[in-house]
Amino acid sequence: MRLGVIDVGSNTVHLLIVDARPGAHPLPASSFKHQLRLAEFLTPEGDIDDAGAETLAAFATDCLDHAADLGAVKVLGFATSAIRDAGNTDAVLARIREASGIDLQVLSGEEEARLTFLAARRWHGWSSGHLLMVDIGGGSLELAAGRDEDPSTAVSLPLGAGRLTRHLPGDVADPKQVRALRRYIRASIGEVVPDLTARTPHRVVGTSKTMRSLARLQGAAPSGEGPFVRRTVERGPLKEWVERLAAMPVSERASLPGVNQGRAHQILAGALVAEGAMDLLGIESLEICPWALREGVILQFLDHLDTTGLLELA
């Protein structure tokens, strides 16, 4: 079965086309994305403005047309914190539905953490034992831990790399602002540490573009070498990179390996979140997992498909 998945994130709207069936490895067939950066369309009241809603609705329509051209028999759509936290969520969803016909499912933060954990568990397998997952998105940080496919602990915090970059407005970060943001990040993570450190994990994994970029800065293989190459983020080198990134202008960050122009402005905030999570959770090294939320949504859909047939994502 050829499936399409539309992922409306804080930074990017992404259509992934996969060939999938229950019990099989979903195989990517095509990818179509647009760096919308919804945070830039927020009004002072926290609503997504008309231009942002219109652009999102138009791109959702393009995604459906693209999926149809490639033979997708089903398109699943979901949204995360950018729409979840907007003051006019229902109005934006209605506009997308009217323009494209697709009903986006808005995931809660906990659902986001649980589905991402499911993807990580399936990728790394039961031999990973007690698994700890760290996912840094544009709008939120998801943390989850457990021995099963459904984690025993799953939390979401408003610590996304894009969201926090608003606290670092300059081309070169102000040291006082960096220190203030660092304190805020650690205080937020500190509230959930006891729930996540009750058991020592056998394996720690990181997902998301931010994590992959941080691994590339530490010398990990580029994505072109495939998903089966082991890539890691180490706590010691990460601390050094936090200092280096804080001293760099955005234009210089964009020339670094694994950091493109679209994400150069927020890599410092993402690095501060990763550093805080690794410090407070006692993580010396984490392994990059190539699967994340999109794959989790696909896997959940296929699990239901196995027993109930074609269902809307719920």
Image (cartoon, rainbow, N blue to C red):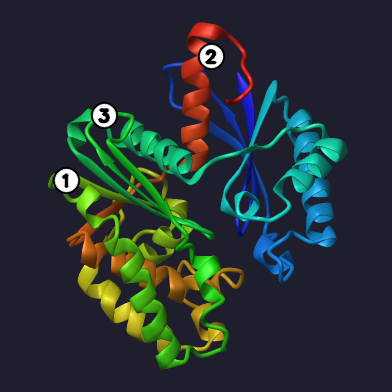
Give, as a three-letter code, the residue at label 2. Leu
Point out the residue furthest to the right here: 99
In this orientation, does residue 295 appear?
Answer: yes
Residue that numbered label 1 is attached to: 201
**What's the distance in space between the residues labelled 3 and 1, CA to CA?**
12 Å
Residue that numbered label 3 is attached to: 148
Q: Circle 3 sits in a helix, a strand or a loop, which is it?
A: loop
Residue at image point 68% right, 23% down: 74
Q: Choose top left, top right, bottom left or bottom right for residue 129.
A: top left
Q: Earlier in the sequence, mark 3 or mark 2?
A: 3
Residue at image point 52% right, 88% down: 249
Q: Tell me the tag on residue 305.
A: 2
Q: Circle 1 sits in a helix, a strand or a loop, which is it?
A: loop
Give, as a three-letter code, the residue at label 3. Asp
In this orientation, does residue 218 appear?
Answer: no
Is 133 on the left or on the right of 170, as rendered?
A: left
Q: Earlier in the sequence, mark 3 or mark 1?
A: 3
Q: Is residue 222 above or below residue 133?
A: below
Badge count: 3
- Of tags 3 and 2, which is closer to the observer? 3
- Name the spot of residue 229 as percent of width and height, x first: 32, 48
Taking depth in this image into account, of 87 and 135 the one nearest to the observer is 87
Q: Are marks 3 and 2 in contact (CB under 8 Å)?
A: no
